[in-house]
């Protein structure tokens, strides 16, 4: 079995904001485990897809959640007509066949689950399948990536220190205003003027981070708004639907945000 | 609702009571009896005459029964508030009848007056005098709520009540606005702040302007020293318009913050020049702001209403100039206005510098002098009304500033009402009288602690059962730093009760170290459940449908719980517990010390706070341990340093605690209230009021998903605690000395 169906065929759009691609390629040459930090919707996942496409490596993405167990990553026995069969989990598949394994929002998983990646992220580079009594040595192409949003999770959820220190990290923020506008214009297929206006709106909401909002409007949200405008919705309504309503339920914040958006338009 | 009754006035006013217009005999005799009753009571001619003349007009609107019934109210007003007030009543009643138009509203008004008579007789005349003014803004139910707010706010302090009902007290007009449904600054404060932050990332403290600020500049905002002052309301604006003017006002001040870099020195400038420079500066910063945020034009423009022509007076010219600068395309008739606009536009390239405002303003001021237009700086107000009073733009030298604004710290501004009280030397006396009157109010003020100034952190509403809703922003929570005692005392307590502590830690251990549990026959799981697999294979060989639940999962039962323990430290906790040498507070502290050991042992996030209160605007809240703080020496020292004092405003403290607890992201949240009595405070004489408020608070908190549980100490108060928390959520500990042992056990029972 190969991971060919995990290969990305077409180039995913990615606008470099610094030298993150070069940094990543250097790390990839060493198969160094990477951690991507940054607020939601700022382009972490898109970046991973883009570099996987550049390097022509299969990308196995796992969205982590609270209820995830080690078996969900590693694999488990299933029952079939003749007895039991072992089914590799997504992590094991990537380890065996070589590919980039991307654990999205890793802090959502419980800490006792995430320790299974420890042996993969140091010099050992193997994965023990305890139940199957097998030691899978990592394929030379295997690389582990995780994403991590330090902001919005509560203090209760954080990575173990011993997990954190196995990774090199890239920090993603919201791109500079002109770059973000370029991204929105491209992804939302709108003109530069509207894109700039949307970024200005986003800056208003990001000003409120920590003063009533947990997080400002993400680039993804702005692209949604841009697409709504492209479909004939007015800017005001598009921002209401794509930015204000999703981002907060607090009536005062909604009011402040709506008025600030009105000021930008 | 305003019935025209004037047509019958001539005829009726001349008539005496006994010659009342025709009607069924029964009614007539009631009315006659009422007139006679007042005559015989000897309240004087003034009272009987006004009753007679106005009574009939009232009868025309709401019927003779109602008019006759008024006699009773007049009589009680005469007895309690004096004949002068009683003589006013019939006229006020007529106004009320005309305004309300129907019997029900009129009756409600009379009832309110009755209540006022009983609880604030000294203020009756003042309220009656203002009947028309009040009822123009409020309907009967709102009027009732407003009067009640006055009674609740001033309590038994007669002079304070009088200040409220004569509308001298700022609270009175604030509540008037609120009851009338006006948009007040308090309603929009939070969103205005957020608006300013969103636009320019500005965080400036905002305050409602005080009465002193308002004396000169009615309803204009102001900023100085980084503090923004906004009028309580903009009276002629309602609903959405009112929201908009607050927002316009904030955006304007924000523009000043961003673009008016330095204050202008006043120097030799005449007042008219100061006003003009300010006006140009207003226009300049607004234009700069609109470059950044084009949508602001839409916000500000509805308030620029000055026409193209008008009188040649300073206010009119100024308003037109303001409009012309804001809206340069508009045709202007006046040469001076045109000149100002043209000069301003010609220097567009220099708008970035405030110097341009100074230059143009100075020149225009000179022109105005030559035109012999009078300018009165005392009455001048910047127009349109969203603009500020401009004091923040200028550096006044000594004596020049019309109103010296004192820098206020947050606490000063919130405790405004306290300061006003202090002006009355006999207040203490009054309070003392009150305390001796009513047994529920037995609390004395704590000695002021040096260097421990509380910080007002939040306002919460309070539920009033009489109006059946919450009165918003009624109580102020003031957080005080805990005074450190000796942490050693707490350790000593633990050592003294070593046996109990050991027993507890054993229980804790067994409660929290749960063995991993095998959960068999699952649809999904980490490994195969071999028994289920065999069963499944057998089923299939027999041709049956196999059970798909063949997996096994191991799980630990997880505790996911955060607890906030709220401790009552009111004066009554200083009482000795019968048969011991300890006070109630001592035992509370002991109990908390042991409970905290247990909680720390379990690893549950927990917080400890204590509360007491000194009237509604000073509810003390002491954080002993926060959720994210460790349970260490500092927390123990704070616990040991607690002192008893003041009263028990339970609802407010619970609301604040619940807000704190609400930030915990745990599956279960528990608010544990430990109290030795029922809610009370010295400004509340009605024993039911605070009980019902606490009940409303408890219900609200549990609706929001936080469990509320109360431990009542001592016997005899159970019924009210049951009423507040519900019978299932109260445990009464009669023998207080057993609390330290009982509390941790109770906690474990509650949480496992």
Image (cartoon, grey):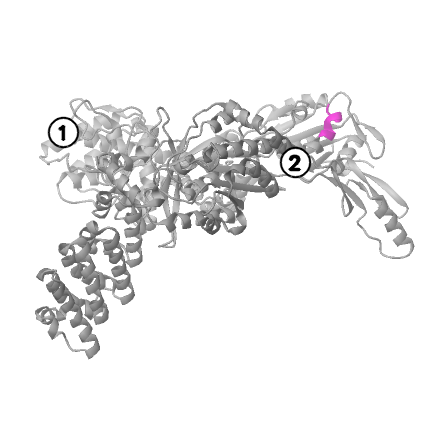
| Residue B139 position in % (x across, y down) | 28, 58
**B110 versus B290 height, above or below:** below
Q: Residue at x 33, y 36 (%)?
A: B444
Magenta stretch bounds: A115-121
Q: CA distance from mark 1 to mark 2?
A: 88 Å
| Residue B91 position in % (x across, y down) | 16, 60
Find residue B225 and name its label. Answer: none
Rendered image quadrant of residue B362 = top left
Query: Residue beneath label 1, please?
Result: B366
Q: Quadrant of the N terminus of chain B?
A: bottom left
Q: Quadrant of the C terminus of chain B?
A: top right
On the rendered structure, is A192 left or right of A159?
A: left
Nearer the observer, B429 or B610: B429
Could you tell me what secondary structure mostly forms the magenta stretch?
helix
Q: Residue at x 79, y 49 (%)?
A: B549
Q: Is residue B119 visible?
A: yes
The chain holding disc 2 is B
At mark 2, the secondary structure is: helix
Callout 2 environment at 10 Å: few (<14), some (14 to 19), or many (20+)?
Answer: some
Q: Residue at x 81, y 35 (%)?
A: A2
Find residue B507 and name its label. Answer: 2
Nearer the observer, B390 or B98: B98
**B129 versus B511 height, above or below:** below
Q: Earlier in the sequence, mark 1 or mark 2?
A: 1
């Amino acid at each position: 079995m190969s991971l060919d169906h995990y290969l990305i065929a077409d180039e995913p759009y990615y606008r470099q904001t610094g030298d993150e691609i070069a940094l990543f390629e250097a790390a990839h040459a060493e198969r160094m485990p990477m951690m991507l930090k940054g607020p939601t919707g700022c382009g972490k996942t898109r970046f991973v897809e883009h570099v996987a496409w550049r390097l022509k490596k299969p990308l196995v993405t796992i969205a982590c959640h609270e209820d995830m167990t080690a078996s969900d990553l590693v694999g488990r026995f299933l029952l079939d007509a003749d007895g039991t069969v072992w089914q590799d989990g997504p992590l094991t598949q990537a380890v065996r066949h070589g590919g980039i394994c991307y654990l999205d929002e890793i802090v959502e998983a419980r800490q006792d689950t995430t320790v299974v990646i420890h042996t993969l992220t140091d010099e050992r580079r193997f994965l023990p399948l305890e139940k199957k009594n097998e030691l899978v040595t990592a394929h030379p192409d295997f690389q582990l990536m995780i994403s991590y949003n330090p902001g919005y999770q509560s203090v209760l959820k954080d990575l173990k220190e011993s997990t954190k220190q196995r990774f090199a990290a890239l920090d993603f923020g919201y791109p500079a205003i002109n770059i973000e506008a370029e991204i929105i214009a491209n992804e939302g297929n709108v003109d530069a003027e509207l894109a700039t206006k949307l970024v200005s709106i986003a800056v208003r909401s990001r000003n409120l981070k920590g003063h009533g909002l947990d997080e400002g409007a993400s680039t993804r949200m702005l692209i949604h708004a841009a697409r709504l405008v492209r479909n004939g919705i007015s800017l005001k309504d598009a921002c209401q639907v794509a930015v204000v309503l999703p981002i907060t339920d607090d009536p005062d914040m909604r009011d402040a945000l709506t008025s600030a958006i009105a000021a930008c338009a | 609702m305003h019935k025209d009754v004037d047509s019958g006035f001539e005829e009726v006013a001349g008539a005496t009571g006994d010659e009342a217009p025709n009607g069924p005999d029964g009614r007539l005799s009631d009315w006659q009896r009422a007139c006679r009753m007042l005559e015989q009571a000897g309240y004087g001619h003034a009272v009987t005459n006004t009753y007679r003349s106005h009574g009939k007009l009232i009868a025309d609107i709401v019927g003779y029964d109602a008019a006759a019934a008024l006699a009773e109210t007049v009589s009680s007003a005469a007895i309690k508030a004096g004949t002068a007030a009683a003589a006013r009543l019939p006229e006020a009643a007529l106004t009320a009848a005309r305004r309300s138009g129907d019997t029900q509203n009129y009756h409600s008004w009379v009832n309110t007056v009755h209540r006022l008579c009983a609880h604030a007789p000294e203020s009756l005349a003042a309220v009656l005098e203002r009947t028309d003014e009040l009822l123009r803004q409020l309907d009967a139910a709102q009027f009732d709520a407003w009067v009640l707010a006055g009674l609740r706010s001033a309590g038994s302090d007669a002079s304070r009540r009088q200040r409220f009902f004569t509308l001298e007290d700022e609270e009175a007009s604030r509540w008037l606005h609120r009851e009338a449904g006006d948009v007040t600054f308090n309603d929009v404060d939070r969103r205005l702040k957020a608006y300013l932050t969103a636009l320019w990332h500005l965080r400036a403290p905002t305050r409602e302007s005080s009465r002193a600020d308002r004396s000169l500049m009615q309803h204009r905002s102001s900023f100085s020293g980084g503090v923004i002052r906004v009028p309580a309301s903009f009276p002629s604006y309602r609903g959405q318009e009112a929201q908009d003017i607050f927002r316009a006002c904030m955006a304007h001040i924000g523009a000043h913050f961003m673009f008016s870099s330095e204050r202008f020195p006043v120097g030799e400038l005449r007042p008219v020049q100061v006003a003009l420079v300010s006006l140009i500066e207003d226009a300049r910063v607004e234009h700069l702001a609109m470059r950044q945020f084009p949508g602001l034009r839409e916000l500000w423009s509805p308030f620029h209403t000055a026409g193209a022509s008008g009188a040649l007076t300073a206010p009119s010219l100024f308003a037109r100039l303001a409009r012309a600068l804001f809206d340069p395309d508009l045709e202007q008739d006046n040469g001076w206005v045109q000149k100002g606009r043209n000069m301003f536009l010609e220097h567009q390239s220099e708008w970035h510098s405030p110097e341009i405002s100074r230059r143009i303003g100075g020149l225009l001021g000179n022109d105005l002098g030559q035109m012999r237009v009078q300018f009165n700086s005392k009455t001048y107000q910047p127009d349109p009304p969203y603009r500020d009073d401009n004091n923040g733009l200028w550096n006044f030298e000594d004596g020049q500033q019309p109103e010296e604004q004192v820098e206020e710290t947050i606490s000063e501004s919130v405790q405004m009402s306290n300061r006003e009280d202090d002006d009355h030397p006999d207040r203490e006396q009054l309070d003392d009288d009150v305390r001796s009157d009513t047994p529920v109010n037995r609390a004395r003020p704590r000695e002021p602690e040096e260097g421990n100034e509380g910080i007002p952190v939040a306002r919460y509403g309070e539920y009033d059962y009489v109006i059946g809703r919450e009165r918003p922003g009624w109580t102020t929570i003031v957080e005080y730093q805990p005074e450190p005692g000796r942490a050693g005392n707490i350790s000593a307590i633990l050592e003294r009760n070593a046996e109990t502590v050991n027993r507890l830690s054993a229980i804790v251990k067994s409660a929290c170290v749960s063995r991993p549990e095998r959960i068999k026959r699952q649809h999904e799981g980490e490994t195969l459940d071999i028994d289920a697999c065999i069963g499944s294979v057998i089923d299939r060989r027999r041709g049956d449908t196999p059970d798909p639940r063949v997996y096994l999962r191991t799980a630990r039962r997880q505790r996911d719980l955060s607890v906030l323990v709220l401790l009552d430290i009111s004066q009554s906790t200083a009482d000795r517990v019968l048969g011991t040498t300890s006070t109630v507070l001592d035992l509370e502290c002991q109990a908390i010390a042991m409970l905290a050991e247990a909680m720390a042992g379990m690893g549950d996030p927990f917080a400890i706070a204590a509360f007491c209160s000194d009237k509604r605007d000073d509810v003390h809240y002491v954080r002993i341990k926060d959720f994210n703080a460790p349970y260490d020496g500092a927390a123990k020292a704070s616990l040991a340093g607690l002192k008893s004092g003041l009263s028990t405003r339970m609802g407010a403290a619970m609301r604040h605690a619940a807000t704190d607890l609400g930030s915990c992201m745990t599956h279960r949240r528990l608010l544990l209230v430990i109290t030795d009595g029922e809610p009370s405070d010295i400004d509340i004489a009605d024993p039911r009021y605070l009980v019902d408020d606490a009940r409303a608070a408890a219900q609200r908190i549990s609706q929001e998903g936080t469990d509320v549980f109360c431990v009542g100490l001592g016997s005899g108060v159970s019924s009210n605690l049951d009423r507040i928390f519900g019978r299932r959520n109260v445990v009464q500990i009669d023998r207080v000395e057993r609390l330290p042992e009982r509390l941790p056990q109770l906690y474990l029972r509650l949480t496992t």
